Image (cartoon, rainbow, N blue to C red):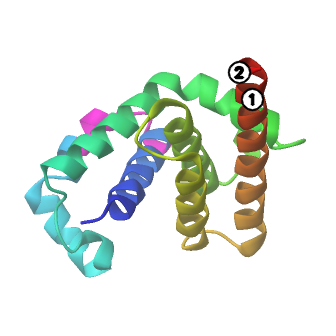
């Protein structure tokens, strides 16, 4: 299983947590049980194999950080989603945006460009082209400001 697949599973877990109001860790225990995951295998290649320990560690680390930083992540998304409130975004786009912003800010082993590219490619599987362009625009503006702030801090 690749990191891309682990990231997509993390996004699905965040989507489910937001929809249910439950904690991602609590959902992960159920979602990744061998019995439940086997029932999902008919839904597509994403569920072909259970994540290994390394992927599960990544999924849990990412989803826990998203849950912990959710208000901050949502504020960032709203700031860059010009004239759009978080509650007006599609749940999928919001889960993708939260994941990418979290990876950029808090996961040192994920380069900014990779986080953005992965987010856009994953969103293409679930949303309309206009929404994918929106996600790309939000993340691009965020990354540019972050790079500018970093450059200003070094000067």
Query: From the viewer's perspective, is 72 left or right of 67?
Result: right
Residue drawn 54% across the image and 52% down it: 115
In the rendered image, the quadrant that contains the C terminus is: top right
Toward which corner of the image does residue 131 lie, by quadrant?
Answer: bottom right
Q: Position of residue 67 (x, y in %)?
A: 45, 29
Residue beneath disc 1: 151
For mark 2, what is the residue?
154
Q: Position of residue 7 (x, y in %)?
A: 40, 55
Q: Is residue 145 left or right of residue 57?
A: right
Question: The residue tagged with tag 2: helix, strand or loop?
Answer: helix
- The residue tagged with tag 1: helix, strand or loop? helix
Instruction: Please report the bounds of the magenta region as a residue range.
Output: 19-28
Q: Is residue 63 above or below residue 35?
A: above
Residue 126 in magenta stretch: no
Which quadrant of the view contains residue 34?
Answer: bottom left
Left or right: residue 91 compared with residue 76: left
Whether pointer 1 and pointer 2 mark residues with C-beta atoms closer than 8 Å, the reply is: yes
Q: Which of the image's four quarters has the N terminus?
A: bottom left
Q: Main secondary structure of the magenta part?
A: helix
């Amino acid at each position: 299983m690749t990191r891309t697949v682990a990231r997509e599973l993390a996004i699905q877990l965040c989507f489910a947590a937001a929809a249910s109001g439950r904690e991602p860790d609590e959902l992960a225990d159920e979602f990744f049980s061998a019995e439940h995951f086997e029932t999902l295998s008919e839904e597509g290649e994403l569920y072909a194999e259970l994540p290994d320990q390394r992927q599960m560690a990544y999924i849990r680390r990412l989803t826990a950080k998203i849950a912990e930083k959710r208000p901050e992540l949502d504020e960032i998304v709203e700031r860059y989603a010009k004239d759009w409130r978080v509650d007006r975004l599609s749940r999928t786009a919001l889960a993708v945006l939260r994941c990418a912003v979290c990876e950029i800010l808090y996961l040192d082993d994920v380069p900014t460009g990779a986080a953005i590219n992965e987010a856009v490619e994953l969103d293409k599987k679930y949303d309309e082209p206009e929404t994918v362009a929106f996600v790309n625009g939000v993340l691009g503006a965020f990354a540019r400001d972050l790079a500018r702030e970093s450059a200003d801090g070094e000067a």
